[in-house]
Image (cartoon, rainbow, N blue to C red):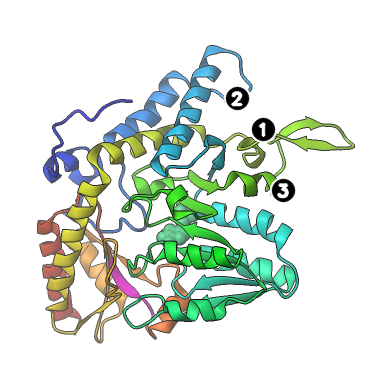
Amino acid sequence: MTSIDTDIKPFDVAAIRRQFPVLERKVKGKNLVYFDNAATAQKPQVVIDALVRYYHQYNANIHRGIHSLAEEATAAFEATRDTVKEFINAGHREEIIFTRGVTEGINLVAATYGRQNIKEGDEIIISGMEHHSNIVPWQILCLEKKAVLKVIPVDDNGELVMSEFEELITPQTKIVSIVHASNSLGTINPVKDIIDIAHQHNIVVLVDGAQSSVHLNIDVQEMDCDFFVISSHKVYGPTGVGVLYGKKELLEEMPPYMGGGEMIKEVTFDKTTYNELPYKFEAGTPNIADTVAFKAALDFVTEVGKENIRKHEEALTKYAMEQLSGIDGVRLIGTAKHKTSVVSFIVDGVHPQDMGILLDNYGIAVRTGHHCCQPLMNRFEIPGTIRASFAMYNTKEEVDELVKGVAKAIGMLK
Ligand code: PMP
């Protein structure tokens, strides 16, 4: 691993910022303030270097080659699997399946475990704050199998109504698929409680870790989830790579997702036998370069320290919520007790998109709209929100810029 070539001490945000080249750029003549981290995080130099090094020095297809480059590429690719295993404390490296991201991971489980185990009349429970990628794959499965999708409601603070969860469970409930931390509101859900309750009823649980894996310590064994999904790009890694963690005994029973090279043991025109885990689920040439560089991102986060990052982001979130709620006309959406660094808000009489455009003119990147959570927006009876989401490199001064920008924009739009 290339170690970080500066003196990062807990928590030297200036030293952290120097690791992210994009933060030096200007937008519309202003210093970039990047607050769209829940959509995708920026990449540190070590990740960019790992990508470039792969293409400069050892680009080759993996697993089957016997030449040196193929061996180096295979070793680097498989090293990422070991790092992911440590990062989420999985029990076995073959429980780590590389995917394109969270969306693919959930679709994989719905299409394999789901198709194999769900039958007519069965029930799947999700929550009212799911991202579309944790809704639509289950709807497709339910349509195909004539199964029923049930939804845990969300209260006014943006927390799950847990008493209703138990009410939803019946002998027909087979899967619960739940977001760990909401991308729209930041709410951290009590996944451990959900898993414990579900397991008392022999229900399998998938946890969408798209937003949690970057902010929270993840221990899949302690959590006891059956499946956990991650996208590299949210954890400071490249786009196009993700992870599906699954318990070995479940993955072994599941049919493959895609057929093709790599996932086979033997092919004849009569019959194909499948490769062992994890390769059974990794058909075709994978995204080698990005997977290799994903390791650099995870090492980087571990080196900076998740606890350090979390404390820093929590302080920013608290400060931003206090400052924004002090502006006349601003209403925070999502005030759960336990939150990641997401601040969603609306402004009376101002369309979120108009606010987003004006903030961009000040160099501030926020996300506006439904954040791929249309049912959640319907629950709050709003078209969307303005969302600022913070990462390890954001600063209090940047939050001040946002607050100033919002106040100025309101003056212009009203
Ligand atoms: N779930 C949540 C909670 C997310 O925030 C996202 C990304 N916005 C996804 C799923 C989908 O992730 P990806 O687009 O990386 O597959």
Q: Nearer the viewer, residue 344 or 412?
A: 344
**SS for tag 2?**
loop
Residues shaded magenta:
383-387
Quadrant in which ligand 1 is drawn:
bottom left
Residue 382: give x, y in percent of width and height: 37, 83
Asked if the residue at label 2 sits under 8 Å from ligand 1, the reply is: no
Circle 3 sits on which residue? 255
Q: Residues within 10 Å of mark 1 (few under 14, many from 20)?
A: some
> Where in the figure is residue 65, as x and y percent of width and height?
61, 18
Q: Quadrant of the C terminus?
A: bottom left
Task: Please give the name of the residue rendered at 44% of the width and 39% of the height, measured from the top-left corner.
Answer: 84
Number of disc labels: 3
Q: Which mark is residue 63?
A: 2
230 vs 340, left or right, is: right
| Mark 2 Cα shell of 10 Å, populated few (<14), some (14-19), many (≥20) | some
Magenta segment, prevailing SS (helix, strand or loop): strand
Under tag 3, what secondary structure?
Answer: loop
Instruction: From this view, report whether residue 261 is shown above or below residue 191.
Output: above
| CB atoms of marks 2 and 1 within 8 Å | yes
Amino acid found under the numbered disc labelled 2: His
Say what amino acid the circle numbered 1 marks. Answer: Glu
In reply to whether residue 270 is colored magenta, the answer given is: no
Callout 3 crowding tier (Cα within 10 Å): few <14, some 14–19, many ≥20: some
* Residue drawn 53% across the image and 64% down it: 177
Dot 3 amino acid type: Pro
Q: Which mark is residue 262?
A: 1
Q: Are marks 2 and 3 in contact (CB under 8 Å)?
A: no
* Closer to viewer: mark 2 or mark 3: 3
